[in-house]
Amino acid sequence: MAVNRVPVLKRCRSLDLDPTFLGYDKKSKRTNSRANKKMSEYGLQLREKQKAKFIYGVLEKPFRNYYDKADRQKGQTGENLMVLLERRLDNVIFRMGFARTRREARQVVLHKFITVNGKVVNIPSYLIKAGDVIEVKEAARSIQRFKDIAEITAGRIVPEWLDVNKENLSGTVKEFPSRDVIDVPVDEMLIVELYSK
């Protein structure tokens, strides 16, 4: 399995991205030396794609598959792509506040701590559906790690398309998110332009 080991702050700096979108509260004191250089149209499109891939922790081949799936669906391809990425199980765990970062959410899922509709799911890319009930396994709720996570993520705002019970570490997906409630700083139209060449 391929793993992205790029230092987070370094990558955020190169993509001109705020680390808070990834769940990190650190800031880099360095500045990007290439910040003022003019970028070509292709460079801008590529950077938006890299930004989306980095935020959601998706590698090139699965990202292309998401794009193809979004292209086949009704509606705008860019919006469909963002909704598909937002529906990933590791992202939903992060949004519910059961993990500090998406990388940690991915690990929580891989370690079989999460159940979807009562069944253990250990696939971070599993696409949730409206009405799915997602919860931390009963045996894992008493683990100190989840207590620490609950303290840290207590102030995080849960999106309106999710209904979360912090005490029981469970939540329900009320509906699919629309593009206007997804707060990710990505211009999906540039990604569509890049892939449609």
Image (spheres, helix red, strand yellow):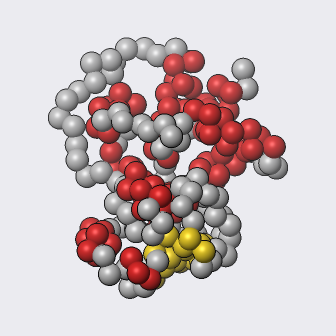
Picture coordinates of residue 144, whole percent (x, y):
26, 74
**Residue 151 shows in this picture:** no
Picture coordinates of residue 85, whole percent (x, y):
59, 50
x 60%, y 74%: residue = 119
x 44%, y 62%: residue = 111
Q: Describe residue 149's horizontal placement relative to residue 28 as left or right.
A: right
In the image, 54 versus 190, the foreground residue is: 54
Q: Describe residue 50's horizontal placement relative to residue 25 as left or right.
A: right
User: Residue furthest toward the left?
Assistant: 29
**Residue 148 shows in this picture:** yes
x 49%, y 27%: residue = 47
Q: Describe residue 59's horizontal placement relative to residue 6 as left or right.
A: right
In the image, 126 versus 91, the foreground residue is: 126
Picture coordinates of residue 74, whole percent (x, y):
82, 49
User: Residue furthest toward the bottom?
Assistant: 167
In the image, 195 versus 88, the foreground residue is: 88
Position above or below: 185 against 23:
above
